[in-house]
Amino acid sequence: MLHDNLSVGENGHLYLCGADTVTLAEKYGTPLYLLDEDRIREKCRTYHRAMKAYFTPDSRPLYASKALSFRGIYRIAREEGMAVDVVSPGELYTALSAGMDAADICFHGNAKTEADIRYAIDAGVGLFAADSTVELDRISAYAVQRGITQRVLLRITPGIDPHTFDAVNTGKVDSKFGSAIVTGQAEEIFCYARALPGVELCGFHCHIGSQIFDEKPFCDAADMMLTFMIALRDTYGYTAEILNLGGGIGVRYTEEDPYIDIDRTLELVGAHLHAVCEETHYPMPKILMEPGRSLVADAGVTVYEVQNVKTIDGYKSYAAIDGGMTDNPRYALYRSRYTVVNASRASAPADFVCTVAGRCCESGDLIGEDIALARPACGEYLAVLVTGAYNYAMSSNYNCIAKPPIVLIAGGVDRLAVRRETFEEMTACQL
Ligand code: LLP
């Protein structure tokens, strides 16, 4: 199977970390998001251990909670000693309401409003990743008004193309995020930030993209950032305390995707950072990283019930399910490929090639095309694998479809973490 938390039981059903996905679908209804909590915790520990061992003892992972944001996941993050990256006041609110310590939160975003900044400062967020001089002005003014000093990082675009597809490429020079080194704007914003009252510049942040499968782009980004930091030290006598290298480690969605060893990747990035710092006599900064997808994606499976199977002779076949782009818009948006299994007969040969279609009134509502699985019958369950990241987080109520529940599985025991949305809740804001 694609990941070692997946198996087939003697009854032929698909199991996720020892739990029968068909039994859970019957218990909670479909569509249903399942999450292997043990795996998420194990990944948090891997990042922690590796960053301390290979970077510096105070280096730390921040969970990029845009990948999957609900109270339960922040509780897990907190229990695992993770810091957290949030990109909106809503994520901040959810994290705080789950008991996260504001000091462990970094507030991101390229268009933070005045209200966002005030809310985050009032909450006591530990760090801002500041994107522009306008934002720095707002942080500075409100911090001065409050009589505090706000710690900030500056978001820098190092100009690295990690060779992923454009929609998730964020570290290139023409990005909507941050200030580019080559245009001189990074140096300008550095000088600007240093002169502001109420703001303590702690270092720099970059995020070069997503679905990266080797250490090279991270090493290249680190090179660009360190070269920039060394130039600032030599010109202005400023030494950065923190270098935040963002997220982006890839995840295996299909058999064609490679495996990536997180520990080994961080070991190689760490060795590279140490070598450059030694050579340039730059004190090794505290490294932060912001994994999102690689912490939660392969912990997730979505289970659907098949509503119809049709073959258009000479053309193609469809399996229609009771969910789709409202709970997983990633194929519709990015043509992202998924592995789909007939969860009711997971050991049967995958000899039926079809398009898995969602229930929305829209031809583009697909989970995938050219998908091979055991020919499903109406009422059987399909499992879409590796849906832990950017599925629930990107879900919508299009066609007034209610959001599915999330069930966490820990030590083989399932528990409801987000219940199914009711129509009353879905329409609650409508006057
Ligand atoms: N840090 C920053 C500043 C980011 O912008 C992101 C992702 C991350 C960390 C986490 O990256 P990860 O480790 O998850 O690759 N909706 C798209 C993904 C957008 C990612 C945006 N930023 C998708 O479904 O593929």
Image (spheres, helix red, strand yellow):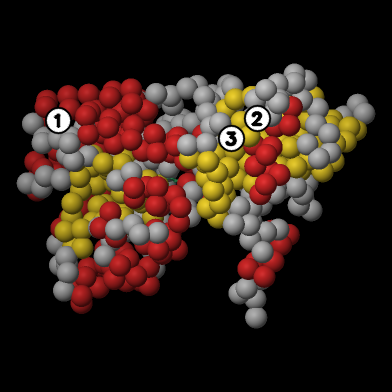
Quarter the C terminus occupies:
bottom right
Q: Is residue 292 left or right of residue 195?
A: right
Q: Quadrant of the rendered structure where residue 422 is?
A: bottom right
Q: Quadrant of the rendered structure where residue 341 is?
A: top right
Q: Is residue 4 left or right of residue 350?
A: left
Q: Which residue is mark 3?
A: 19
Quarter the N terminus occupies:
top right
Ligand 1 in which quarter? top left
Q: Earlier in the sequence, mark 1 or mark 2?
A: 2
Q: Is residue 95 visible?
A: yes
- Callout in the foreground (3, 1): 3
Q: Position of residue 307 (x, y in %)?
A: 82, 43
Q: Position of residue 338 (x, y in %)?
A: 63, 33
Q: Foreground residue, 174 or 111?
A: 111
Residue beneath the point at 67% across and 59% down: 402
- Callout in the foreground (1, 2): 2
Callout 2: helix, strand or loop?
strand
- The amino acid pointed to by label 1 is Cys
Q: Which residue is mark 2?
A: 14
Vertical order, 363 against 426 (above or below): above
Q: Is residue 418 left or right of residue 279?
A: right
Q: Neighbour class for label 1 at 10 Å: few (<14), some, many (≥20)?
A: some
Q: Which mark is residue 115?
A: none
Q: Earlier in the sequence, mark 3 or mark 1?
A: 3
Q: Which residue is mark 1?
A: 277
Q: How many marks?
A: 3
Residue beneath the point at 40% across and 38% down: 41
Q: Is residue 133 visible?
A: no
Q: Neighbour class for label 2 at 10 Å: few (<14), some, many (≥20)?
A: many
Callout 3: helix, strand or loop?
strand
